[in-house]
Each structure stands twice: as C-alpha cells, then as structure tokens.
Amino acid sequence: MSEVENESTSAPETAAAFMEALNATDSNGTDALNATAKFVATPEGTALAYGSLVLMALVPIFFGALRSVACSKSKELGEKAYESGIRNTSDMPETITSRDAARFPIIASCTLFGLYLFFKVFSQAYINLLLSVYFFVLGVLALSHTISPLLSRVIPSSVPNKQYQLLFTQGTGENKEEIINYEFDTNNLVCLLASGVVGVWYILKKHWIANNLFGLAFALNGVELLHLNNVSTGCILLGGLFVYDIFWVFGTNVMVTVAKSFEAPIKLVFPQDLLEKGLDASNFAMLGLGDIVIPGIFIALLLRFDVSLKKNSRTYFCSSFLAYIFGLGLTIFVMHTFKHAQPALLYLVPACVGFPVVVALFKGELTEMFRYEESIGDEGLAKDDSSEPLKKDQ
C-alpha cells in the first residue's frame, strides 16, 4: 500500500504504482513523507480513499473466483473442443504447477533487473511509449473480456447477435493446419469498441478512472484465468513472492529505480481530496495489482476446493476472503501508524495461508485440502506437479 502523491502523472506516483504492482514500496519512504507534508488529507477523505481501495480490491477477487469455478468446469469441454479443431481457447485457464510457482520469483527477478538495465541504457520516454501501447492493447482486450458476459445479459434476446469466425491456416491440402480459429459475435465487437474508447481516454488523459477500469479488468482476468493446481503450489508461490518482496525492496535499490521510470495501469488509485476537488483530484492512495491477483488466485483455488467437497458450504473461501480483508486492513493500519509505505504481501501472505490452514486443522480436513488436485486437460488429476501448464492459442 502506497502513501499519498501530489500529481496524477508524476514520477513519484508511477514509482509507487510499480512498486505496489510488485507488492513492494520504497524502503525509505521519502516520497511518501514529503507528499504528506505538502498535503494533509481530511479524515473523511482518507476513509473514503482507503475504503474505496479495499472495496475495489475485493470486487475482482470475489467475482474472479466465481468465474474461475465456471472456467474450471468448462476446461475439459474446452480441451475436447480444442482436439476437435475448435481453437477458440481465449477463456481457457492457465494452470500453474509447483515448478512454475518455484520459478516465478526467479523469472520476476530477472524481469525486474532487465527493466533496470533497460532504463539505464535507453531513453525513458521511448520505453514508456512502448509500454503505453502494450498496456493499451492488453487493457482493451482484458476490459472487453470482463464486460462481455454482463453485456450479454443486458441486451435483449430479440436483438440480433451475429456470429463471426476468424480463421488462419497454414499449408494446403492434407498438410493444411489451423493456426487460429476464433469465434466471436456482435456483442464481443460492441465490448471491444467500448473498451477501445476507455483505452483512448487513458492514453490521452491518464485519468484515474480509466486507470482503475483497466486495473480492475486486469485483476479480475488474472484471478479467473490463472489457476493453481493445488494448495501446495499456492503456498510455494505466495512464499516465494513474500521473500521476493523483502529482498528487492529492502536489500537493493533496483525496484525503486525501475519504479521511478515506469508508467502503466498496474495499480488501483483513489484520490484522498475527492471531496474537495471532485474528479480533478490528484492526491492518490494506491494499491498494486499484485496485492490483489497473487492472493486472489489462492482464494479462488480454495473456492474450487469448497465446490469439490460438494458440501454446499464455502468455508475455506469465506475464511480466506475474510483473511484478505484482515491483512489489507492491517497493512493500512501499520502504514498510518508508522507513517511508512508497506509491502502488502508482508501481511496478506500469512493471513491468506494461515487462516484456511487453521480452519482445516479445526475441521480435520488439512490432509484432504493439501491432497486436492485440479485436473489438467483430459489427463484427470494433476498427479505430476512438474507437468507443463496448458498452452492456449491467443
């Protein structure tokens, strides 16, 4: 969780944004303290800002977890359709195995250090221009995928909804091979157009509402489509990123250096001076998407575990969801008590892992919880944690 910033597109803001996206903050807190000295938020403004951030964090976790259940149920059907030649697999989840989870902090560290070298060698303006285009494309696609189910429910069935197919093949005759076979409809095109408008708004204005729309879409899609194959994998992933946070934030200045040069919609923001300045407010409290997606995919896994028990209860989902609220609240409390920005995963990881484990111990289901395995493709149970995740055509 970051402190307050004074300009909506300033370097300190983007610094805090990237650090939060990687679940970390500046170890010396200088920018945060300086900003606090320039602007003192009212108690009402602070409560509104952080209350809104907590609510915005809970929405993609809750709905992303629910959508992940439906996504998991359709996985087998999707694999069968894929084998039959229907390759419209954009809604297929990516399964994260234990090997993937163990490698993730290493890959993230290499990426972070690579960005550090890039910003040292190349012009910051050109790199951020490329990043803006990259996140524009990703944001439009993510937002379109997010609102498509909602639009399908809102539009009356009497309105024509034409079907389309985008087909790319390679070779001819018997050697002809499908590369992309993507099916979509009129509703998808409308969603894409609406998302494109938001994308242009963000590119031109970098407005905080457009930023949040993209951020919420990224978070919800991440929770929905990134599936952990078992609880042990989740513990490995969260534990690895917990150590990753501590090392890169408090052990080096690499993350801080990269963060001060990075611009992207990778955080949720809410102004603390909204009551005074309205939509033109510019003193933001923020939360990185990593603090939402990483615990969120673990919470979604526990919801799918609840469903697999077939007991018509959501005990583990509720306990982990409440643990997330507790951990996020503790992050805010510590930050304001010590006037220092905090890496949220420092509190979220122990809470989100610890609470469900305690509940499982109390119910005598700890062994069953750690034995739970999600199916991968049509191989049935994922008995081999080292197996590669599903590959999908984009």
Image: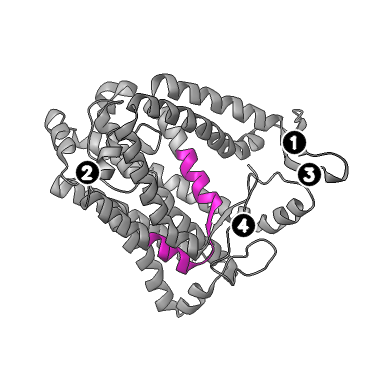
Residue that mark 4 sits on: 72
Instruction: Give the percent coordinates (x, y) of residue 10.
Output: 27, 26
Secondary structure of residue under mark 3? strand
Of labels 3 and 4, the one closer to you? 3
Q: Earlier in the sequence, mark 1 or mark 4?
A: 4
Residue 329 vertical placement versus 359 (above, below) = above
Of labels 4 and 2, the one closer to you? 2
Residue that mark 1 sits on: 168
Question: Is 229 in the magenta?
Answer: yes
| Number of residues whose C-alpha sits closer than 10 Å to that of mark 2, classed few (under 14), some (14–19) or many (20 or more) | many
Secondary structure of residue under mark 4? helix
Q: As rendered, which of 355 and 133 lies closer to the eye? A: 133
Kindly indicate the quadrant of the structure image that contains residue 288: top left
Instruction: Give the percent coordinates (x, y) of residue 41.
Output: 19, 33
Residue 18, numbered circle: none
89 left or right of 361 in image: right
Residue 126 vertical placement versus 174 (above, below) = above
Would you say residue 318 is visible in this rendering? no
Q: CA distance from mark 3 to mark 4?
A: 28 Å
| Number of residues whose C-alpha sits closer than 10 Å to that of mark 3, classed few (under 14), some (14–19) or many (20 or more) | few
Residue that mark 2 sits on: 26
Q: Are marks 1 and 4 in contact (CB under 8 Å)?
A: no
Disc 1 marks which amino acid?
A: Phe
- What secondary structure is the magenta-colored segment mainly? helix
Residue 130 vertical placement versus 2 (above, below) = above
Q: Which residues are magenta?
A: 216-238
Of labels 1 and 4, the one closer to you? 1
